[in-house]
Amino acid sequence: MIATTPTPPYYAVIFTSIRTDYNDGYSDMATRMVEMAHLQPGFLGVESARTELGITVSYWESPESIRVWKEKAEHLIAQQIGRERWYESYKIRVCKVERDYGFEL
């Protein structure tokens, strides 16, 4: 599903990852993180796709809302477990969206 976002500017956090073969608990944690993000002030939406390379883009109102999300205790635990078990590698990019446009049927 393509996230509905407001008129720019807003912010995007792009999480790109390569998974390990270890799957125990991954789906539950991923679902929980999305549920939690939806409850955070400043959260605007999320888009995610995975093949060999996974890409999740979350959208936020401000750098402050991103910082608060990053520091949530349960999110910090998920990050630690991800580094230890679920991800071979990952990269996070934070961007200011200055323009967006699209097409819908």
Image: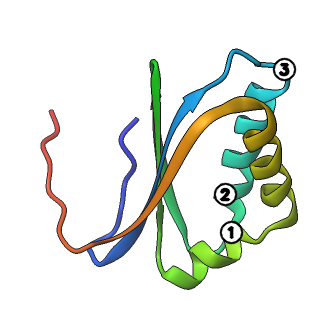
Where does residue 6 sit, x and y in percent of width and height?
Answer: 33, 69
Q: For mark 2, give the secondary structure.
A: helix
Check disc 1 and report the residue beneath it.
Answer: 69
For the residue marked with disc 3, what is the amino acid? Asp
Q: CA distance from mark 1 to mark 2?
A: 7 Å
For the residue marked with disc 2, what is the amino acid? Ala
- Indicate which label's residue lies in the foreground, 3 or 2: 3
Colouring rule applied to residues: rainbow
For the residue marked with disc 1, what is the amino acid? Trp
Check disc 3 and report the residue beneath it.
Answer: 24
- 46 versus 100 height, above or below: above
- Indicate which label's residue lies in the foreground, 1 or 3: 3
- 77 versus 48 height, above or below: below
Q: Quadrant of the N terminus?
A: top left
Label pair 1/2, CB-CB below 8 angstroms: yes
Q: Is residue 44 left or right of residue 89?
A: left
Where does residue 82 sit, x and y in percent of width and height?
Answer: 74, 40
Give the mark nearest the N terminus, 1 or 2. 2
Q: Residue at x 76, y 72 (%)?
A: 71
Q: Nearer the viewer, residue 16 or 45?
A: 16
Check disc 2 and report the residue beneath it.
Answer: 37
Give the mark nearest the N terminus, 3 or 2. 3
Where does residue 96 sit, x and y in percent of width and height?
Answer: 33, 74
Q: Nearer the viewer, residue 21 or 96?
A: 21
Q: Is residue 55 left or right of residue 32?
A: left
Q: Residues within 10 Å of mark 1 (few under 14, many from 20)?
A: many
Q: For mark 1, give the secondary structure.
A: helix
